Amino acid sequence: MNPQSEKLIDQGQLPGGSHWSLIMRRGRILRLTDLEGGANVGMLFYNPEEKLERYNAPDTLKCQHTFKLSRGHCLYSDMGRIFCSIVEDSVGWHDTVGGNLSDSALTTKWQPVSYQQGRNNWTLSGEHSFKVELAKYGLSAADIPANLNLFSKTEVSENGDLSLATDNSKAGDSVELRFEMDTLVILHTCPHPMNSETEYPRKPVQYEILMADPVGTDDFCKNFRPENQRGFENNRIYLQEPLEQSEDKGAAQ
């Protein structure tokens, strides 16, 4: 990972089985680190100025010809714009199709623990967590698209069955998302829906918010796929950047 400690804005830790939301400003990096190994971070992205614009998993995959996400990939909105780019990644595979742990699946997999019973150690589903955070911004369950699961890997058997890899992310693994436009980020650290552990897993994650370096013409993510260049151009038009400044100023504002 590139050292960015001199550009640190904020940092903290998210316990396993918790949720959070924030607006990431353009030109900032969100670095997430798996502290114990086996973490899962469910994520959604929205345009804070027009929340009908949101993360689109199918477009993200098909325009970059991939089933997984890793360094170089960009995360697209349903308007063809880029919310963020994966600029660093020590994991190598992040799940895009596994979905989100529902309340009903939580009850089936693990013994539910209410807040009255467990206080901060109650068992939360990804579905509940997303709905709580979305409500803070006037959104509801109807506004939940297909989500991203950082640190998790889904494997496909010969007969097409999906399962969760158990050794995908190790303690200390991290991923860095550079935001190419202001983005409402909704996230949780609840278990992946395919997790088969006998006890509800609680895997903490560290977060750091840092200033990003400018995006140059040779930027790895921008040039990773021809489609990404078009995505960055869509961002430039949306942000009303002059042509002569777009390649020099990049993400850092």
Image (cartoon, grey):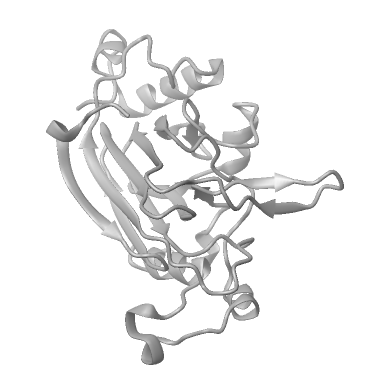
The quadrant of the rendering that contains the C terminus is: top left
**Image location of residue 131, percent across then percent down:** 45, 68
Relative placement, left or right, of 22 versus 211 is right
Q: Is residue 89 above or below residue 231?
A: below
How many numbered marks have been drawn onto this rendered protein structure?
0
Residue found at x 24% / y 23%: 213
- The extreme left residue here reads 6
- The extreme right residue here reads 159
Residue found at x 62% / y 77%: 104
Residue found at x 52% / y 63%: 191
Residue found at x 37% / y 44%: 172
Closer to us: 9 or 84: 9
Q: Is residue 37 above or below residue 103?
A: above
The quadrant of the rendering that contains the N terminus is: top left
- The extreme bottom residue here reads 116
Q: Is residue 164 above or below residue 87?
A: below
Q: Is residue 120 above or below residue 151?
A: below
Give the image quarter of residue 3: top left
The answer to whether any part of residue 138 appears in the image is no
Give the image quarter of residue 5: top left
Relative placement, left or right, of 54 versus 8 is right
Closer to us: 88 or 38: 38
The answer to whether any part of residue 244 appears in the image is yes
**Image location of residue 195, percent across then percent down:** 60, 62
**Image location of residue 152, percent across then percent down:** 54, 49
**Image location of residue 149, percent across then percent down:** 52, 50
